Amino acid sequence: MNRHHFLQALEHQLVLLAQAVAPLADRPLAYSRFDRQLFQSHGTRLRDYLSEVEQNFQSLRHLVAENRTERVAFMTEKLVAQIGALQRELSTQALRRQEEKTPIAIASDLYQKLAEHQDYERRLNLMIQDRESQLDRATTLNAQQQLQREVAALEGRLARCRQALARLERQVERREQGL
């Protein structure tokens, strides 16, 4: 697929996404739904995230025009991930509205979520240990730099996981105290 067709296909996806977001664009969300590495926006409206996606698409167009291949690949990957995240968020809106109506169901899942996050934390720790061990054995500078980036990314994920764990633990504690 040549670049022109690719950009047209992406633009078509953005038009469809904008149409799907439109009815919910200004409805405030309870909290930011997306990873901070995926979106720079930290708002609670889908319109904020859609605007960022549209800006990134314009940046991608400029990068394609300038023939900056590496940046095009990076921006394309990010743009596709952002579009996918917004599409997933849109597809879960009916479930989210249902959850808002049944807080008891949410509370009953707290222990399950807590266990899941504890498992995530354990797995992230293992992944970090594995990458650090690979880093100790790495012989080339490129491999070392790549592994260092992976360790840094995993440590960021671990920090976010621990924040989520702390929130869940506070929720469980409040629940057990009857608050």
Image (cartoon, rainbow, N blue to C red):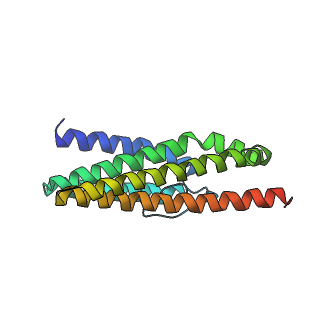
Quadrant of the rendered image containing residue 66: bottom left
Q: Position of residue 89 (x, y in %)?
A: 53, 46
Q: Position of residue 109 (x, y in %)?
A: 71, 44
Quadrant of the rendered image containing residue 10: top left
- The outermost residue toward the left is 67
Left or right: where does residue 63 sit relative to residue 120? left
Q: Is residue 111 visible?
A: yes
Q: Image quadrant for the C terminus?
A: bottom right
> Which residue lies at the image location 38% right of the left edge and 51% below the top edge?
130
Q: Is residue 12 above or below residue 178?
A: above
Total number of numbered discs in the rendering: 0
- The outermost residue toward the right is 178
Q: Is residue 36 visible?
A: no
- Closer-to-camera residue (140/48): 140
Left or right: where does residue 100 sit relative to residue 77? right
Q: Image quadrant for the N terminus?
A: top left
Left or right: where does residue 99 sit relative to residue 138? right
> Which residue lies at the image location 39% right of the left edge and 59% below the top edge?
153
- The outermost residue toward the top is 1
Left or right: where does residue 158 sit relative to residue 77? right
Q: Position of residue 73 (x, y in %)?
A: 23, 50
Q: Position of residue 4 (x, y in %)?
A: 19, 42
> Which residue lies at the image location 57% right of the left edge and 60% below the top edge?
162
- Closer-to-camera residue (101/139): 139
